[in-house]
Structures are given as C-alpha cells and as structure tokens.
Image: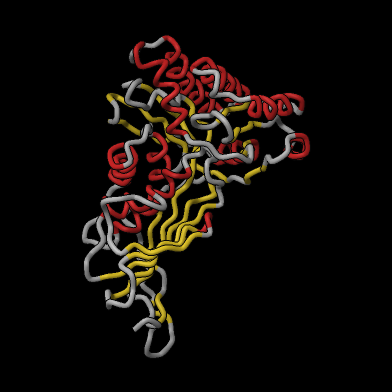
C-alpha cells in the first residue's frame, strides 16, 4: 500500500576531489600520464528507499535536491531527459523488476565546481544500486563503471581520475599506463602532516558553474594532432611527482610551488583554462601570503581554485574574507580531507507492525 514503509533504505556517500595535479594527462588523447589528487568533504550523498513493486508506485522516483526537482521514470533506459548522468547510471546498473525505488541525491559542493562532483554523485549512486543485487563491486570496478557511463553512454569527454578519487578517497598518486587503465597508489601521511595540510587548504568557488566536457573539446582540438608526446603535456606529467615528494617530506612550500607550476602549465594548454576570475582570486591569495594555488579541474569560465595558505591561520581567514568581499559571487567552500572513499550501508527501517526500528546496518565491502 502507498503508505507502507520501505523494505530497505540504502545510503551511500562519496567524496569530491581538489588539487588535481597532472589533470589532462588522464585522458584518451594524452594516452598516458600521472595524477595526484586529494579527496575531501563535502560528500555527494545518495539514499535509496526500496519498495515492493505494487502497481501504485512509479518504478523509479528521483529527487535531485540541489536542483529542487522531483520526477518519476516509468521505464529505465533509452533516453536521458532530465538528469542524464543519473538516468544513464540506472540503465547501466539495472533495476530489478520486482521493486520500486525512491532515490534522493544531494551534494553541498556546488554544481560545476570543477571538483569532480558529477563523478562523486555517479560513484555514490552506483555504489548504492550495487546493493540491490548479489555480489559487490570493488572500488576500482565502481570507478570504471562511472567512467564508462560518462564516456560510452553519454559520449562525454572525461579523464579517469575523478571517479578513482571518489571511489578510494584519501590522497592518491595515479599512474595512467594506457588510457583508461590506471594504477592507484595511496599517499599515507603522518597525522601531523595530514592535519597541517587540512588546516592550510581552502576551496574558493567562483560562483559560476561550467561544462568540463566543453572545455575538454577545446583543448583536444588543439592537442589531438600533436599526440601523446605534445610538449605542453610534459610539465603536467611532472608536477604530480613533485607534489607527492613534497607531501611525504611535509614541505608545504615545495607543494605550493608544484601547485603553481601545474596551474601555469594548464594556462599554456589553452588560454581559456585559467580565466580572469581565477587570476583575481590568485592575486588576492598572493597578497595574503598564500604559498600555492591550483585551478581545479578543467578550469574555463567558473569552477574553483584550491589555495594553500602560509603558516598563520588568521591570515588565511583574512584572505578568504577579502576574496569574498572583492570578487562578487565567490564562496568559500569548507573542506576536510577524506580518509575514506565510497561508503555504502543500510539504515534502520521502520517496522510496520510495532513502529520500532529494525536495524539492518552492515559493513560495506568497499
């Protein structure tokens, strides 16, 4: 009946990523490369309420909370009308015929923030849908599935690093051996370095979203003919190594230099990748003693910048206040390092007979 409690409530969460050193070398046109990125809160969150298919409910109901949109799907697959990434993930994973799903999705990271938010949503949704059938995907399989959805079903330009960051969490050094095949090595740091890195990092959203796939197309148009050995790609393959070594040494000035070198190399890829708005944030950061800055993701119009502050916490807060005051529309997005990647669990379900909770929480296999 329509008012009956769900059979199951499946929850999942996956982090976004910042400071994607070596981005663009994880693409099909680069063929091989290296990336280092940092997984952070805020998470992308998914909750699936599972009901018996009774003829009264639509097979799938979706609540895209960030957009304030609720809609239903009478069938899964074929066309992707409202939110293609969500609908393609449902087609890819499949929905058992005997159940109906109510899916809600949310992320505190703004849409188009250049922090792999779409990948985090896709990873969280795939992880939750995976619990509807026997067996469990590994983190690498979840990341691979999310990447295939974007590139094969939706025909979008997409590197491999974002999905890996969301699936695994932490700080990772990724070697792309032959796109899309990659090896991931976690960067494990002492707590003192981990905590100090978290204290120094900040994320500034420019207040305007962008389409990373469109920016990819502009860069590809310029670099495709040059091939994997394009001169402009070489510096981007080197900065992840410098960032990795700086992190292990706890050398934040060296880390900041790697961030700056990577951003400069991005700008040389295409003039659209580091915009005037990005540069305005960087100029203020310089004035307040920041030791590093990295334009996140594909750059272009909108997106975000990761800043690495100096020693004084008060100076960092003054810097962020100045950015928001002097550049209208910018936002400081609070971030915390995420030691975990994708998490999936079952929440307590109300018991229809006595109104008490029936706990069904289990440890995820991811």
| Residue at screen point 28% across, 30% down | 181
| Residue 13 place in picture, x, y as percent | 44, 54
The quarter in which the N terminus is drawn is bottom left
| Residue 244 place in picture, x, y as percent | 48, 26
Whether 134 is drawn above or below 259: the answer is below
| Residue at screen point 38% across, 67% down | 102
In the image, 52 versus 334, the foreground residue is 52
Whether 176 is drawn above or below 193: the answer is above
- Kindly tell me whether residue 301 is visible in this rendering: yes
Specify whether 209 is left or right of 62: right
Q: Quadrant of residue 207?
A: top right
Specify whether 191 is left or right of 354: right
Q: How many marks?
A: 0
* Colour treatment of the image: secondary structure
Q: Give the residue at the far bottom of this rendering.
A: 354
In the image, 352 versus 63, the foreground residue is 63
In the image, 69 versus 188, the foreground residue is 69
| Residue 68 place in picture, x, y as percent | 53, 59
In the image, 174 versus 161, the foreground residue is 161
- Kindly tell me whether residue 202 is visible in this rendering: no
Specify whether 109 is left or right of 291: left
Q: Quadrant of residue 229?
A: top left
Whether 257 is drawn above or below 278: the answer is above
| Residue 50 place in picture, x, y as percent | 34, 70
| Residue at screen point 37% across, 32% down | 157
| Residue at screen point 38% across, 86% down | 352
């Amino acid at each position: 009946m329509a008012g009956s409690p769900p059979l199951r409530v499946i929850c999942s969460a996956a982090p976004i990523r910042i400071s994607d050193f070596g981005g663009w070398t994880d693409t099909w046109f680069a063929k091989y490369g290296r990336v280092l990125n940092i997984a952070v809160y805020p998470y992308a969150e998914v909750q699936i309420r599972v009901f018996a298919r009774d003829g009264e409910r639509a097979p799938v109901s979706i609540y895209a909370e960030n957009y304030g949109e609720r809609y239903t799907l009478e069938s899964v697959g074929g066309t992707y009308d409202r939110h293609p990434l969500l609908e393609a993930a449902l087609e890819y994973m499949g929905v058992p015929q005997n159940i109906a799903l109510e899916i809600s999705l949310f992320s505190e990271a703004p849409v188009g923030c250049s922090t792999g938010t779409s990948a985090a949503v896709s990873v969280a949704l795939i992880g939750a849908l995976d619990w509807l059938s026997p067996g469990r995907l590994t983190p690498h399989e979840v990341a691979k599935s999310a990447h295939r959805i974007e590139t094969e079903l939706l025909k979008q330009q997409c590197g491999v690093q974002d999905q890996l960051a969301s699936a695994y969490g932490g700080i990772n050094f990724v070697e792309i051996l032959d796109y899309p095949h990659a090896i991931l090595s976690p960067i494990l740091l002492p707590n003192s370095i981990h905590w100090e890195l978290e204290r120094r990092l900040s994320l500034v959203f420019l207040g305007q979203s962008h389409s990373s796939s469109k920016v990819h197309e502009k860069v590809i148009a310029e670099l495709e003919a040059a091939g994997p050995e394009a001169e402009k790609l070489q510096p981007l393959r080197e900065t992840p190594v410098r960032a990795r070594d700086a992190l292990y040494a706890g050398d934040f000035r060296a880390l900041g230099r790697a961030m700056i070198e990577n951003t400069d190399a991005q700008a040389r890829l295409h003039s659209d990748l580091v915009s005037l708005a990005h540069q305005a944030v960087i100029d203020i950061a310089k004035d307040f003693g920041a030791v590093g800055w990295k334009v996140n993701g594909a750059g272009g119009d909108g997106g975000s910048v990761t800043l690495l502050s100096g020693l004084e916490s008060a100076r960092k807060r003054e810097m962020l206040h100045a950015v928001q005051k002097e550049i209208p529309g910018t936002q400081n997005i609070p971030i915390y390092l995420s030691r975990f990647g994708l998490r999936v669990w079952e929440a307590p379900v109300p018991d229809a007979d006595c109104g008490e909770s029936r706990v069904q929480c289990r440890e995820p296999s991811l």
